[in-house]
Amino acid sequence: MPRDAGRADVLTVLRSATAGTHEQVETALALMDPDLHRDRLVAVLTRLHAFWRSAEAGLDDWARREPADAQAVGWSRRRRAHLFARDLEALDAGTPAGIGPDLPPVEDTDQALGRLYVLEGSTLGGTFISRHLATLPTLGPGVRVGAFSPYGGETGAMWHAYRRVTREHVAAGGDAGRVVDAARATFAALAEWCAPVAVAA
Ligand code: HEM
């Protein structure tokens, strides 16, 4: 964990501590490729669906143990695995099996907010990705991929709410180092999980 994680703004540390892995995942997925074709998109969505299933299962367990914290961050609205499944069905790829990686359990709210940083942050780049996918002719008429931009016009508000809750949690005694460690571990697991569908850098 970065040595200043306890003092610096936790969101600033999260961003800098995960910037390298973010870039790695972004390059590996190559979703902004103008020549992205359907089969590759299906492969990536299948992989992401399975990852989200695993990541959400751990968060659901946490939410059962810490319902007030889960409610504060709006967890019930942030689940997204079903949206990846819906996109795969719209692309005629059938219902995905969804067996994902074995992620570590989410022990507490520090770790939940760290994992959520990765999942929720992906909606920011996701708005660019959705816009790009909508321009691709190979996906077929009328196919709209929704999982990358689940909140539409509320993306900024949902991100703002996540950041506010995370800052408040740390200000109230949460452990910023554990938040950051959980985010790094989640990003690293995602990078490893996506390696089989990565394009050559
Ligand atoms: C599932 C894969 C991805 C994950 C988990 C992910 C995660 C994140 C996270 C955590 C942030 C927030 C950074 C911050 O603290 O401000 C972010 C922002 C961003 N991501 Fe990604 N990302 C993913 C894929 C991509 C891809 C493929 C692109 C390529 C377009 C992308 C482009 C961006 C951009 C442009 C931002 C900044 C948006 C802004 O500041 O308004 N991301 N992403």
Image: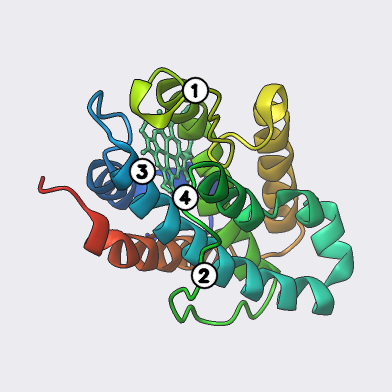
Q: CA distance from mark 3 to mark 2?
A: 16 Å
Foreground disc of the pair 2, 1: 1
Q: Residue at x 10, y 45 (%)?
A: 201
Q: Helix or strand or loop: what does disc 3 sit on? A: helix
| Place of residue 59 in the rendered image (x, y in percent of width and height, measured from the top left) | 67, 69
Q: CA distance from mark 4 to mark 2?
A: 28 Å
Above or below: residue 18 compared with residue 51 = above
Q: Residue at x 22, y 27 (%)?
A: 35
Q: Helix or strand or loop: what does disc 1 sit on? A: loop
Above or below: residue 70 compared with residue 158 = below
Q: Residue at x 31, y 60 (%)?
A: 194
Report which residue position mark 4 lands on: 14
Q: Is mark 2 within 8 Å of ligand 1?
A: no
Q: Is mark 4 within 8 Å of ligand 1?
A: yes
Q: CA distance from mark 3 to mark 1?
A: 16 Å
Foreground disc of the pair 3, 1: 1
Foreground disc of the pair 4, 1: 1
Report which residue position mark 2 lands on: 98
Of the two numbered discs 2 and 1 on the same chain, state the one appearing first in sequence.
2
| Place of residue 123 in the rendered image (x, y in percent of width and height, measured from the top left) | 55, 37
Q: Residue at x 30, y 52 (%)?
A: 21
Of the two numbered discs 3 and 2 on the same chain, state the one appearing first in sequence.
3
Query: Quarter of the image containing the N terminus?
Result: bottom left
Report which residue position mark 3 lands on: 41
Q: Is residue 139 left or right of residue 31?
A: right
Q: Verify CB contact (< 8 Å) between mark 2 and mark 1.
A: no
Report which residue position mark 1 lands on: 141
Of the two numbered discs 4 and 3 on the same chain, state the one appearing first in sequence.
4
Q: CA distance from mark 4 to mark 3?
A: 28 Å
Q: Verify CB contact (< 8 Å) between mark 4 and mark 3.
A: no
Callout 1 amino acid: Pro
Which sits in the foreground, 87 or 79? 87
